[in-house]
């Protein structure tokens, strides 16, 4: 895989082990994109070698590992960050700005969902994604993005959850015959194993601001290739976003003494990240997944060289730990039949 990536993208070299990478003095920063349980040991090795680290979400494979990673962050001067790319979507950032400016008034109803269909096939192999503890399934894979995005847009942390519910649509899956990468469908055996984490989850979140949100996530929602969306209502306006239409958002507010009615707003140079950042400086051009990763990389590199006033800094390991604490609270709420659980 390293050889293929070097060939495709023109890199001068590739390394075949973390030890080689850590020992290479020409490498200053590393993006950790591996299985969740490997985040802590790889990050620890890299930080001890003096490398800045951008770690993929979720921060770690367990809450204990995440706490150790947050402790590593507190004890280093190196830049540490976690990859929450949806913070960088122009439409999402534009809604955040409108809320901060009071254009929606006092918030009253918030609904967020991240529904995907990559696990709908019951014949898909039983990979590591299906073998973790409760909370490590759809919540850890998809819910982390939704939790962080809602907190970011509302500019307020989740302080408690209730109504937690975890469900499993496909209780067993066939064991793979070989290595499976990502969400690929590989060869499988006739032997099945138990899926130990959730296909879907739902809960009610309460934020420090007093606002509540209904939140749901699923990896078995047929027809939803990447269904990240949210709607936010206040007493003076409404805004909504759907990743299936990433270059726009819906906005509705008063004009005089009457609502304007919901209207489609196409993102453009007036919105965050767009001016000076997208390939074409005109509305509805270039909005997509790649741009979010590019801005995240830009923010990470800016932090390394000490530029902090041009692009908003990345989420921290502490942010990633908080997200997993929210997930842990959802799991505990579900275990208690939906009871209220405070987030540390």
Image: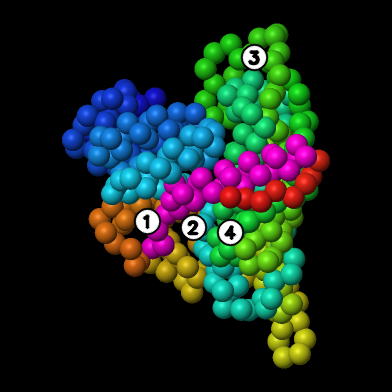
Q: Which residue is mark 1?
A: 299
Residue 176 falls in which quadrant of the image?
top right
Tell me whether the residue at label 1 lies in contact with that at label 3, contact meaning CB atoms closer than 8 angstroms: no
Outermost residue toward the top in this view: 190
Tell me whether the residue at label 2 lies in contact with that at label 3, contact meaning CB atoms closer than 8 angstroms: no
Residue 168 falls in which quadrant of the image?
top right
Residues rendered magenta in the picture: 311-336
Residue 201 in picture, x, y percent from top left: 73, 41
Dot 3, crowdedness within 10 Å: few (<14), some or many (≥20)? many
Distance from Cα at disc 2 to Cα at disc 1:
10 Å
Dot 2, crowdedness within 10 Å: few (<14), some or many (≥20)? many
Q: Earlier in the sequence, mark 1 or mark 3?
A: 3
| Residue at x 69%, y 65% (from the top left corner) | 211
Q: Which residue is mark 3?
A: 175
Give left or right: position of 318 versus 103: left
Q: Earlier in the sequence, mark 2 or mark 3?
A: 2
Q: Which residue is mark 4?
A: 157
Q: Earlier in the sequence, mark 4 or mark 3?
A: 4
Tell me whether the residue at label 4 lies in contact with that at label 2, contact meaning CB atoms closer than 8 angstroms: no
Dot 4, crowdedness within 10 Å: few (<14), some or many (≥20)? many
The secondary structure that most of the magenta stretch takes on is helix
């Amino acid at each position: 895989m390293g050889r293929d990536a070097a060939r495709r993208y023109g890199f001068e070299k590739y390394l075949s082990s973390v030890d080689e990478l850590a020992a290479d003095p020409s490498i200053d920063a590393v993006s950790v994109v591996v299985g969740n349980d490997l985040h802590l040991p790889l990050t620890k090795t890299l930080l001890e070698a003096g490398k800045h680290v951008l770690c993929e979400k979720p921060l770690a494979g367990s809450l204990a590992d995440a706490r150790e990673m947050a402790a590593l962050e507190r004890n280093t001067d190196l830049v540490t960050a976690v990859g929450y790319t949806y913070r960088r979507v122009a439409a999402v950032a534009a809604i955040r700005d409108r809320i901060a400016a009071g254009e929606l008034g006092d918030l009253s109803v918030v609904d967020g969902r991240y529904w995907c269909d990559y696990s709908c096939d019951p014949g898909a192999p039983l990979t590591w994604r299906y073998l973790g503890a409760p909370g490590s399934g759809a919540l850890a894979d998809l819910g982390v993005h939704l939790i962080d995005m809602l907190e970011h847009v509302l500019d307020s942390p989740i302080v408690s959850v209730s109504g937690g519910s975890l469900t499993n649509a496909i209780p067993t899956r066939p064991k793979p015959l070989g290595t499976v990468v990502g969400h690929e469908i590989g060869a499988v055996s006739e032997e099945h194993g138990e899926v130990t984490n959730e296909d879907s989850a739902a809960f009610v979140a309460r934020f420090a601001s007093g606002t509540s949100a209904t939140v749901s996530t699923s990896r078995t929602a047929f027809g939803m290739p990447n269904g990240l969306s949210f709607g936010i209502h206040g007493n003076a306006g409404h805004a909504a976003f759907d990743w299936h239409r990433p270059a726009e958002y819906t906005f509705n507010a008063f004009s005089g003494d009457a609502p304007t009615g919901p209207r489609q707003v196409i993102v453009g140079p007036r919105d965050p990240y767009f001016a000076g950042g997208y390939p074409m400086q005109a509305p509805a051009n270039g909005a997509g997944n790649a741009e979010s990763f590019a801005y995240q990389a830009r923010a990470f590199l800016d932090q390394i060289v000490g530029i902090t006033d041009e692009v908003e800094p990345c989420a921290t390991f502490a942010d990633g730990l908080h997200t997993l604490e929210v997930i842990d609270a959802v799991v505990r709420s579900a275990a208690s039949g939906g009871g209220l659980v405070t987030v540390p």
